[in-house]
Image: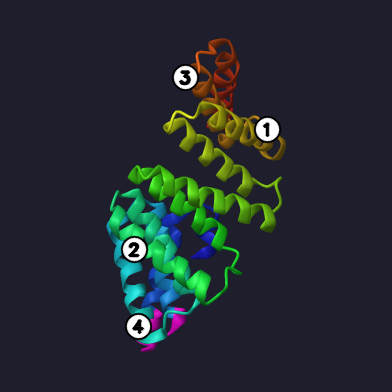
Amino acid sequence: ASYYRDKDEYEIANDYAEIAIDFYAKAKQLRTEEYAEVLIEAGEINEDMDEIATAERYYLKALALYEKEIGEKSRAYVYLLHVLGSLYDDIEEYADAEQLYLKALHIHEKVYKKKLGSYAGLLNDMGVLYLDMGDYAKAEQYYLKSLSRKKKQYGPKSTNYADTEYNLGRLYAKTKDYEKAQRYHLAALQLREELKGKESKDYAASARELASVYIQKGEDENGVHPHKESLESYKKAF
């Protein structure tokens, strides 16, 4: 299932995930962490296929298994809280997403002492959630924490670091702090050009957002160039 998912062949991946689920059922191994991890992967595959209700069903089945049988200190359980929270954010079930994220954050900090590699990503996604909720102060708080963590974990020249710079640019544009928005979008644009090239989707997104900031500032001449870059990048990336 993982092999075909990595190749974006989701229907075949889903077939193998279902075979694995049936195997655990027939072997009466429905209380094991291995079975829970298969359920998580089945959820992710269905989410990739936009089968959101089916993905949620698999995630919730795995969640119940961890909470009733396996325990809540597993790394896979923390990961599950994160991916299910992300799903709820995507479908605008913000209260449920926040609850799951906060629980994952608590385990990251109290059990694993902020040492798991996924901690920085969770902080970033919590920023995304609060931005979606319109709580810009909390969004900024979590984005800045994520950026600091990513700088230590990946270094300031990584795609992970650029992603959070981009998110901060979007946040500051929302709050009309255009100087900060310009600074972060420009930094993300330059880093994405260096790491991924001008034909990447991420570079195109940064160019588009930077153009929008220049236009909002009334600097249309500066906005023209990134906007053209964005259009050209999208043509090549898609």
Determine which of the numbered discs, if any, sits on residue 99 in the image: 2
Amino acid tagged 3: Gln
The residue located at (35%, 83%) in the rendering is 25
Task: Kindly identify which residue carries mark 1.
Answer: 190
Q: Secondary structure at mark 4?
A: helix
Q: Earlier in the sequence, mark 1 or mark 2?
A: 2
Amino acid tagged 2: Gln
Q: For residue 78, say whether it is visible.
A: yes
- Crowd band around label 2 with a 10 angstrom C-alpha radius: few (<14), some (14–19), many (20+): few
Task: Kindly identify which residue carries mark 3.
Answer: 216
Foreground pick, 6 / 130: 130
Q: Earlier in the sequence, mark 4 or mark 3?
A: 4
Measured from the top left, where is residue 35 in percent x and y?
42, 79
Magenta stretch encompasses residue 173: no
- Crowd band around label 3 with a 10 angstrom C-alpha radius: few (<14), some (14–19), many (20+): some
Is 127 placed left or right of 191 in the picture?
A: left
Amino acid tagged 1: Gln
Q: Nearer the viewer, mark 4 or mark 1?
A: 1
What's the CA distance linking mark 4 and mark 2? 31 Å
Q: How many marks are shown on the rendered structure? A: 4
What's the CA distance linking mark 4 and mark 1? 51 Å
What's the CA distance linking mark 1 and mark 3? 21 Å
The residue located at (53%, 56%) in the rendering is 121
